[in-house]
Amino acid sequence: MAESSRPQPYQPGAVSLFFVAKAGVIAAAFWIWLLVLVLRTDAATGAQVLAAVGAITTTLVAVVLACRMALQHNAAVRHAEVKKLLVDISWNAFTAAGNAENAGTVVPFPTGPGDGGRAGSDRVSLLDGGASERSGGRDRSGSGDRRR
C-alpha cells in the first residue's frame, strides 16, 4: 500500500537543535577556558572558579535541553501513532455498523493472542435489535426472557 500524503506530525527540529548546539558550544568554550587557566597558573583564582562554574552549568543545560528534545520527539511519534490508530478504529466501526449484515466486507479488527480468533462471531445488527440472534422469541440462554 502506498504511503499517504498526510502532513508529517510535529517533531522538534531546528530550533531545539539550535539551542542544544548553542549550549554545547558555550560549554566547550568554558571547558577550554578552564583548561587554559589551569595550565597557566598554579594557584586557584577567581577566573578559574568562574570558568569552572560556567563549564558545569552550561554542560548541564546542554544535557537537559538534549533530553527535552529527545522526549518531545518520542512524544510526537507516539501522538502520531495514536491519531492513526483512532482513525483506523473509527473507520472500522463505521464500516462494521454499515455492513453488519454482510460480514465479508467488514475490515476486521486486529485480534490479540487472547481473543481466541472470534473477531466477528458476536456481531449483531443494530437495525433488527439482535432478533437474528434469537430463535422464536427466545434469547441465547433459551429462557425466553426478553430483557434488553
Image (cartoon, rainbow, N blue to C red):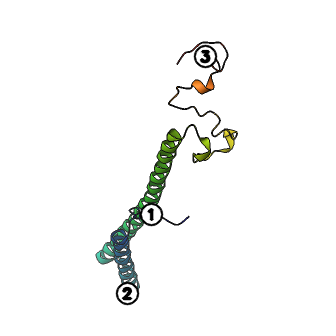
The numbered dot on residue 40 is 2
Dividing the picture into quarters, in which one does residue 18 lie?
Answer: bottom left
Between circles 2 and 3, the one closer to the viewer is: 3
What amino acid is labelled 2 in the image? Arg
Between circles 1 and 2, the one closer to the viewer is: 1
Residue, x 60% and y 41% (percent of image)? 103
Mark 2 touches mark 3? (CB < 8 Å):
no
Give the mark nearest the N terminus, 1 or 2. Answer: 2
Q: Nearer the viewer, residue 30 or 10?
A: 10
Locate residue 50 relative to residue 84 in the image: left or right.
Answer: left
Callout 2: SS: helix
The numbered dot on residue 137 is 3
What amino acid is labelled 1 in the image? Ala
- Compared with residue 103, is residue 9 higher up or lower down, i.e. above or below? below
Give the mark nearest the N terminus, 1 or 3. Answer: 1
Q: CA distance from mark 1 to mark 2?
A: 39 Å
Residue that sits furthest to the bottom in the current view? 40
- Compared with residue 135, is residue 15 higher up or lower down, i.e. above or below? below
From the image, tell me which residue sits under label 1. Answer: 70
Residue that sits furthest to the right in the current view? 116
Callout 3: SS: loop
